[in-house]
């Protein structure tokens, strides 16, 4: 363990003194930080979703919640949506039909509403809000509309037209929607940089004889490789955190379900292990490539494979347990754990195989020289 | 062509002390794409005693580097045995490396470390209890103080080579295997480095020293081992080698041994 710790410190020290670490990893990640703040303040904040009070039990009613979020309406679960609406806390409210009768006694806006007739009265402060709410209701479809009456409000004197709502076939929405692809992008981004650093560092080390010098000490080949992997992985985690920090800054200014994207250690674990797998593959490239050109070629193939797997995951064409693809394909904590396990296992196998092959590699190199 | 030196023992007599390096019938064969394996080392046997420098001489491709790499556990022998400080290179490679200082033409140091850090690194990897103190001690011993805090990549060739020897010897190993350590060095740097090697020998280290420079071998080595086409032709002191071949210089003696030319003075 002491040798591993020594080698790990060596690798960290070397990384900290490598200019590419700053120019290709940390600086871009840091530069994204003010960009994220700028976007969050100037773009996202101008288009914040309107809060819509919904019954506290609504999160189980995924079709309507999903439909609202797609229309940039942020559902805000409360015990009494009608009371929230009447008090002006929210601009609109979704009210369960069973509350309608009791509410109607003191609420002239509900007079004449008859959900059984498949007609929804939509009240809104402006045409845009009305249109968005109508669209959300349409997306929500039959299952929700049979139980709910949707009201949007502000100007109670304005009795808008009655809209007919078509029944749509709403699919089950994913727990983590489209924005979850940011995670896959983060993995790819930092791993792309890690490739150049790891693969070329491995080749340079062997060309300069550093690996050989380390291998004639009591340190073992797997310790040399594992130390390099851990050091680079640590750097990638830092870069990932910086990148994720931007996403947090962006999404923190967006109320509603977006905030759920950053929940869950399982998702973070799948991200980190996917990075580790990329590192391990690049480590193999750097160990086996005889020169920088070969490292670039082999690394390009590996990178293409990584990109392909991520693409399969983003397109939802791969199972969650498939290494690398899983980080993008997973949508539930359990699936993220599956992705974590498969990536971690494959990472260890790649490192073990590379370490076992390193001695053999020395032999092959010597044999080649003999020819 | 092989084995014609009847008057010169292919293996030297045993040194008086227990050998620090012991090589017995060592063979290392490299598989070839076509044809039989290439015998880089073919049945070599010799010993190196503590406090002795044995020069390993031979033309390019003779098998010197392969032999040294076997001793450094970088590649296993095909047959035969080799032991360093009493530890077998196959059965106890970790202990061999712990008792060995190895320097080859292909080994290097991390460019972005200072001399002090590089010495501390190797001291730590060898498990020394006080690596910083060991590094400081090596800086003094190998006269590296003037550039102790300079990065390796900023050193001249001579300085870097001196540092590499210091790193190989920072843990004061009983055995040093040095493969052409003066290659590429100027005269002054070579003199400095040879003094370092002599000092290590005087401290009791056994040194196996490969070189193509006959003057250097003549000056430095207590015994000379000549390897040719994988086979050990002779192990003898420089003086004995000259006398037995009748050659006026070690270089000429080497040529005669390699060419298997019995001299008038033989026998």
Image (cartoon, helix red, strand yellow):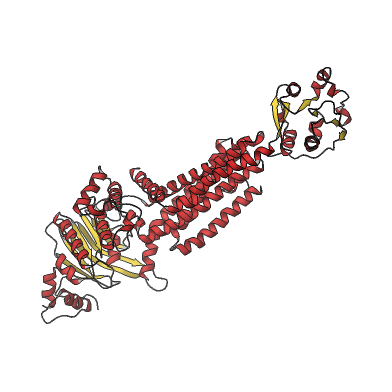
Percent x, y for residue A157?
A: 85, 26
Left or right: where B187 falls relative to A252: left
Q: Is residue B242 visible?
A: yes
Vertical order, A336 against A54 (above or below): below
Q: Nearer the viewer, residue B249 or B17?
A: B249
Q: Quadrant of residue A108?
A: top right
Vertical order, A288 against A331 (above or below): below
Q: Is residue A322 visible?
A: no
Left or right: where A140 falls relative to B107: right
Percent x, y for residue A39?
A: 62, 43
Percent x, y for residue A351?
A: 45, 50
Left or right: where A89 falls relative to A262: right
Percent x, y for residue B60?
A: 29, 72
What residue is at 26 percent from the left and 59 percent from the top? B159
What residue is at 65 percent from the left and 33 percent from the top? A255
Q: Residue furthest bottom?
A: B264
Quadrant where the C terminus of chain B is found in the figure: bottom left
Count the marks: how many? 0
Left or right: where B82 falls relative to A9: left
Vertical order, A108 against A59 (above or below): above
Q: Quadrant of residue B176?
A: bottom left
Q: Quadrant of residue B230?
A: bottom left
Quadrant where the N terminus of chain B is found in the figure: bottom left
Q: Nearer the viewer, residue B200 or B98?
A: B200
């Amino acid at each position: 363990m002491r040798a591993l710790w020594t080698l790990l410190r060596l690798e960290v020290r070397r990384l900290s003194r490598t200019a590419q670490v700053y120019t290709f990893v940390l600086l871009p990640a840091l530069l994204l930080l003010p960009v994220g703040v700028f976007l969050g303040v100037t773009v996202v904040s101008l288009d914040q979703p309107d809060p819509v009070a919904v019954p506290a039990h609504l999160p189980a009613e995924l079709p309507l919640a999903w439909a609202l979020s797609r229309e940039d309406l942020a559902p805000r679960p409360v015990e009494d949506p009608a009371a929230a609406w009447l008090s002006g806390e929210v601009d609109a409210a979704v009210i369960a039909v069973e509350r309608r009768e009791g509410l109607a006694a003191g609420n002239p806006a509900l007079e004449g509403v008859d959900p059984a007739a498949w007609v929804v009265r939509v009240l809104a402060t402006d045409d845009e809000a009305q249109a968005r709410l109508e669209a959300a209701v349409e997306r929500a479809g039959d299952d929700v509309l049979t139980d709910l009456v949707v009201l949007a409000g502000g100007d109670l004197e304005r009795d808008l037209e009655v809209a007919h709502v078509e029944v749509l076939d709403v699919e089950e929405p994913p727990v983590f929607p489209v924005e979850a692809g940011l995670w896959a992008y983060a993995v790819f981004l930092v791993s792309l940089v890690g490739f150049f650093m790891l693969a070329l560092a491995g080749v340079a080390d062997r060309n300069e004889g550093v690996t050989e010098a380390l291998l004639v000490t009591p340190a073992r080949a797997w310790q040399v490789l594992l130390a390099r992997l851990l050091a680079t992985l640590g750097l990638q985690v830092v870069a990932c955190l910086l990148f994720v920090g931007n996403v947090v800054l962006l999404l923190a200014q967006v109320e509603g379900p977006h905030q759920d994207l950053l929940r869950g250690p399982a998702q973070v674990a799948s991200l980190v292990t996917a990075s580790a797998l990329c590192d391990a593959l690049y480590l193999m490239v750097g160990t086996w490539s005889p020169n920088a050109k070969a490292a670039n070629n082999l690394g390009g193939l590996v990178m293409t494979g990584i990109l392909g797997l991520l693409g399969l995951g983003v397109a939802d064409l791969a199972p969650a347990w498939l290494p690398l693809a899983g980080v993008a394909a997973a949508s539930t904590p359990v699936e993220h754990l599956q992705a974590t396990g498969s990536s971690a296992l494959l990472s260890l196998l790649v490192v073990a195989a590379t370490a076992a092959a390193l001695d053999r590699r020395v032999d092959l190199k010597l044999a080649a020289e003999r020819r | 062509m092989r084995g014609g030196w009847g008057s010169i023992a292919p293996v030297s007599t045993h040194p008086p002390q227990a050998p620090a390096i012991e090589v017995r019938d060592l063979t290392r064969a490299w598989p070839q794409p076509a044809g039989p394996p290439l015998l880089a080392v073919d049945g070599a046997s010799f010993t190196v005693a503590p406090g002795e420098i044995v020069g390993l001489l031979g033309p390019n491709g003779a098998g010197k580097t392969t032999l040294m790499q076997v001793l450094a556990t970088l590649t296993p022998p095909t047959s035969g045995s080799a032991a360093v400080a009493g530890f077998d290179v196959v059965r106890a490679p970790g202990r061999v490396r712990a008792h060995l200082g190895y320097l080859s033409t292909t080994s290097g140091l991390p460019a972005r470390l200072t001399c002090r850090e590089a010495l501390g690194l190797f001291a730590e990897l060898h498990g020394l209890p006080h690596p910083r103190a060991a590094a400081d001690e090596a800086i003094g011993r190998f006269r590296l103080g003037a550039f102790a805090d300079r990065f390796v990549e900023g050193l001249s060739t001579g300085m870097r080579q001196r540092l590499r020897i210091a790193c190989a010897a920072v843990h004061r190993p009983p055995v040093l295997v040095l493969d052409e350590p003066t290659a590429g060095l100027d005269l002054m740097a070579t003199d400095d480095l040879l003094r370092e090697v002599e000092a290590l020998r005087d401290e009791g280290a056994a040194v196996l020293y490969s070189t193509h420079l006959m003057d250097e071998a003549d000056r430095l080595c207590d015994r000379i081992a000549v390897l040719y086409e994988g086979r050990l032709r002779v192990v003898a002191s420089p003086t004995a080698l000259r006398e037995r071949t009748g050659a006026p210089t070690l270089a000429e003696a080497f040529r005669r041994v390699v060419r298997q030319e019995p001299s008038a003075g033989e026998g």
